[in-house]
Amino acid sequence: EVQLVESGGGLVHPGGSLRLSCAASGFTFSSHWMAWVRQPPGEGLEWVANISPDGRDKYHVDSVKGRFTISRDNAKNSLFLQMNSLRAEDTAFYYCARSESHSWFYWGQGTLVSVSS
Amino acid sequence: QSALTQPASVSGSPGQSITISCTGTSSDVGNYNLVSWFQQHPGKAPKAMIYEDSKRPSGISNRYSGSKSGNTASLTISGLQAEDEADYYCSSFAGSSYVFGGGTKVTVL
C-alpha cells in the first residue's frame, strides 16, 4: 500500500524557516517524480514544486522561487521542502504527492504551516 | 501561471448529470492533453478522478468522464449520488509548471 506521511509543519514568524518532510513507503520511491502541493485553509490548491526521480531536475512555482527548495533522499525514501523567508501568504496545508502522467494519484494527509507574528 | 477558471458552484438532483467546466489558455489546457480532475471532501486530501484529459485512474467509477475542446476542459458526473457532493479542482500541465482551477463546489440537492 502506497503511503505518504508529511511532517514538520507548525507556527513560524514571518521571515522564518521550516523544513517539511515526507516519508514514502509501499512503492519504489526512486522511480517516481514527486511533488508538493499546498492549500490555504478554506481555499484552492496550488502546485508548489516537483522533482525528478534522481533529484537532478527541480521546478518551483514562481511565487516561491528563491525561497523554497524541493529535494529528496532516495536512500531514505524521503521528500523534503526547505522553506525560507516565509510570508503570511505561505500559510497552508502542504501535501506531498506522487506524480504520474502529469497528475497526482497518491497524496499524504497534509501538514499545516502557519506564518504569523 | 494564472489559475484556470471554474464555476464556483454547480448543483444537481440525485440521478441527474452535471458538468463542470475548466477554462485555460493555449499555454496550458489547449496545448497539452494533460488535464486532471480532483475530488476533495472536507478535511480530506484530494483524490484524482481523471487524468490526461479523459482517463480514469484504477477504481474510479465510470460515472466520471472528462473531455476537452480547445482551451476548455470539462468533467461530467452522471447518475449524481450524495457521495459526489464535494469540491472539484482541475489542473493542467503548463510546460515545466502546473496550474489549478479555483475549485467548484458540487451540491447534491
Image (tube, rainbow, N blue to C red):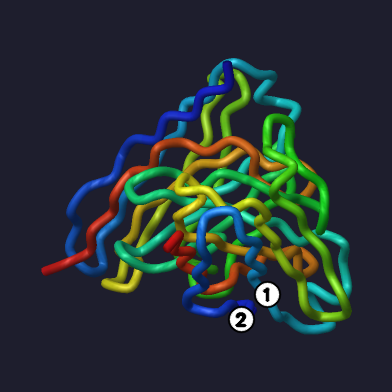
B35, above or below B20, in the image = above
Quadrant housing the N terminus of chain A? top right
Is A33 positioned to the left or the right of B69 in the image?
left
Q: Residue at x 87, y 62 (%)?
A: B33
Tell me the kind of residue under disc 1: Cys
| Residue under label 2 | B5
Label 1 marks which chain's residue? B
User: As rendered, which of A50 and A4 lies closer to the eye?
Assistant: A4
Q: Secondary structure at mark 2?
A: loop
Is B36 positioned to the left or the right of B12 in the image?
right
| Residue under label 1 | B22
Numbered tag placed on residue A17 in the rendering: none
Badges 1 and 2, same chain: yes
Is A82 positioned to the left or the right of A58 in the image?
left
User: As rendered, which of B12 and B45 lies closer to the eye?
Assistant: B12
Residue A87, percent from left and from top: 30, 71
CA gap, disc 1 to disc 2? 5 Å
Residue B12, percent from left and from top: 52, 66
Label 2 marks which chain's residue? B
Q: How many marks?
A: 2
Residue A48, percent from left and from top: 54, 60
- The answer to whether marks 1 and 2 mark residues whose Cβ atoms lie closer than 8 Å is yes
